[in-house]
Image: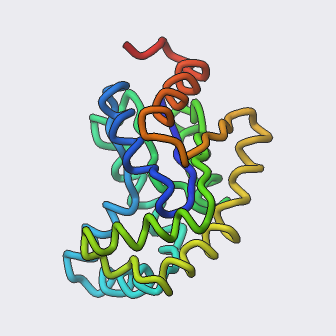
Amino acid sequence: MRVIFIGPPGAGKGTQCKKLVDWLRVPQLSTGVLLREWVEQGTADGKWVGEHLNAGKLAPDHLVMSMVAKRLAEPDCAGGCLFDGFPRTLVQAQLLDEHLARARHQIDVVLSLQVAEEKLVERLLKRASIENRADDCSQTILERLRVFRTQTSPLLDYYHERGLLVVIDGERSEEDVFAEIKRAVALHATVGKPH
């Protein structure tokens, strides 16, 4: 199974991905985690990416796809993975499709977690205070939500046209959201059903 999670910052992609990782027994591929690890290495490239992220901007498409391709080449991704926070632009989606096609793989389902903007801001400010994340100040949060609307939202049409998109109400309880996600994944499974 290859599952993509699309949703604005604070929609619960990471939380639901972890639940689904345990259920499907495939790895979670979080570009946010990969990028933060790269920034922490302190290289010149890492510092440049860090400045981008702290300003609420997306890392360049080619750079992100290069990181994703390296991760997909690792043995634990052979049977699939959960994409958390990737792709974020149409260019990234097209690059991913091309990469998977070369390996004779495909995306099975795309989950769009939808949450009202005021709820997202509230969640992100709470997360910032708990995790002490510099990239979650109110100004950066609003910029990240604007970037999502302008650059990531077109992905919904892209995947809807291909019959892969399932819209999930991300404002309900974690358990209710996960139950709906499991139903969507089971319905779209192309290689067997999860246990």
Query: Residue at position x 70%, y 71% from top?
Result: 150
Of residues 96 and 57, the one drawn nearer to the viewer in this rendering: 57
- Displayed quadrant of residue 154: bottom right
Question: Residue 124 at what x, y percent from top left?
Answer: 43, 68
Question: Residue 146 at what x, y percent from top left?
Answer: 63, 76
Query: Residue at position x 32%, y 38% from top?
Result: 27
Query: Residue at position x 29%, y 42% from top?
Result: 74
Question: Residue 186 at what x, y percent from top left?
Answer: 53, 19
Would you place residue 112 above or below residue 60 in this image? above
Of residues 28 and 96, the one drawn nearer to the viewer in this rendering: 28
Q: Viewed as shown, does residue 70 lie left or right of 115?
A: left
Q: Viewed as shown, does residue 167 lie left or right of 123?
A: right
Would you place residue 125 above or below residue 33 in this image? below
Question: Residue 61 at what x, y percent from top left?
Answer: 54, 68
- Displayed quadrant of residue 90: bottom right
Visual colour scheme: rainbow
Would you place residue 144 above or below residue 84 in this image? below
Query: Residue at position x 40%, y 37% from top?
Result: 81
In the displayed image of the protein, which residue is found farthest to the left?
A: 41
Would you place residue 118 above or below residue 114 in this image? below
Quadrant, the C terminus: top left
